[in-house]
Amino acid sequence: MVQEQGYKEFVDKTSESASRLLNEVRGNAKIHVVSHLDADGLSAAGIICSALRRSGARFHLRVLRQLRRKRVQELVQEWGDVFVFVDLGSGQIADISEFMANSKVFIFDHHPSTGSGSPSFTHVNPHLYNIDGTNQISAAGVAYFAARAMDPSNIDLSALAIVGAVGDQQDKGEQRSLIGLNAEIVRDAKKASVVEVSKDIRLFGRETRPIHITLEYTTEPYIPGITGNGDACAKLLLNLGIPLKEGENWRTISSLTQDEKTRLVTELVRRMMSKGIDPKDAESLIGTVYTLAKEDKGTPLRDAREYSSLLNACGRMGFPGMGIAVCMGDRYENLRETQDVLSQYRRKLAEYLELIQKPNFVKETEHLQYFNGENTIDDRMIGPVTSIAVSSRLLKSDRPVVALANSEDNLTKVSIRATDQLVKKGIDLGKAIQEAIQQIEGEAEGGGHDIAAGAFIAKGSEEMFLLRLDDSIERQLDNKQH
Ligand SMILES: [Mn+2]
């Protein structure tokens, strides 16, 4: 009941934001969209930019790794006075209030916020209505509700909202389904016939790649002995009596018969469990598949997870504009190029995952394990590397993983990940990271969710940061016990 009340208030707020935004469009304001570089950020930007273009707006887009204090200041100096922040902004509400008091500010975000900000802002965030923004709606979803309120014909953009939600790993319901407000978006998507929902093997490339290649490149989940090992993949399929080709053509996972699928999944689950992977994670091979029905078969845009990986790769490899172009309907030049970017991204990811498994690369404190990729690991990829390392048990799962890497402006990027079990024990990484950065010298900004958080800290403060973070985690574990 309480939740439904929250839903109504939230949806009302998205309608209010839509009419305010349309007012700016009618006033012919130049609107500056600022987004985060991951799949959810790019999907959210794609949704807002599509809705703006359809309404005849003048707009401009900027994609950032993080909205740091300095960037907020620069944005006000460099660009006009109407800003739309997507997938960022809520965590930086204090900075935005300080520097943008005279600007028109729209925020469509789902990260925990420290407040609603200046009353003149249009701040749309599920957390402000007691709706869980970690699992129930992504920034793309928030942007979608606003877009739908701008014009009901924007209902087709629900497909992109699903791409954003799976990109942020919000598929936490039964058999990897979307829940909460995301489930309402799925209903819209079905109604508009832009998405079909089914249960199937979830492996990446299910629509596009030869089966053995799909297996070789699988990192989510990571399959011991299979991921990164082409020969073993071909041999496995041979042993299971699954032909790689049909006539001249390579077969894809989506073309397997039910019987072949069962044999393949049984064997993969067996291998994963024999390496100590949680049965629940192993079974995640099968799950809810969201197919974008209007996209051509055999393209990565057919599968919502594959689409989100494509966007994520574009953002993290330095080509966010390419990803946005695809979100906004480009199916020619940009789509082809994004596929090259994705292969490069996946090769790099595989390299990094090898690297962190080298002996002594990962070190430990009392409550943490950590590694510093310095200049060897691209700081934009440290988040995904850490997420995969944790979810596929490449590292120990008894304590959070802290990953560091050199970033721009003489800063170190920090990414921390925990598991559901650690969160249940009382760990809240977002809070811990905020405590830690308050206690170190020099520039430091960060925050995030209980299970995943990040920060930028001044170079040279890494050791102190790790000490403080370790203290915070210790306090969280103690508090829970007493
Ligand atoms: Mn997000």
Image (cartoon, rainbow, N blue to C red):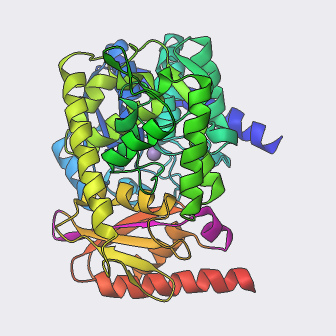
Residue span colored magenta: 408-426
Picture quadrant where residue 136 is located: top right
Q: Is residue 326 magenta?
A: no
Q: Which quadrant does the N terminus fall into? A: top right
Q: Is residue 105 visible?
A: no
Q: Does residue 120 sit above or below 480 in this rendering?
A: above
What is the x, y in percent for residue 94? 42, 60
For residue 74, side relative to residue 387 (left or right): left
**Figure label count:** 0
For residue 128, side relative to residue 431 (left or right): right
Residue at position x 25%, y 57% from top?
351
Residue at position x 61%, y 43% from top?
266
Residue at position x 62%, y 27% from top?
259
Q: Is residue 411 magenta?
A: yes
Residue at the extreme right: 1
Given residues 160 and 247, the one toward you in this image is 247
Q: Does residue 199 sit above or below 444 in this rendering?
A: above
What is the x, y in percent for residue 62? 24, 39
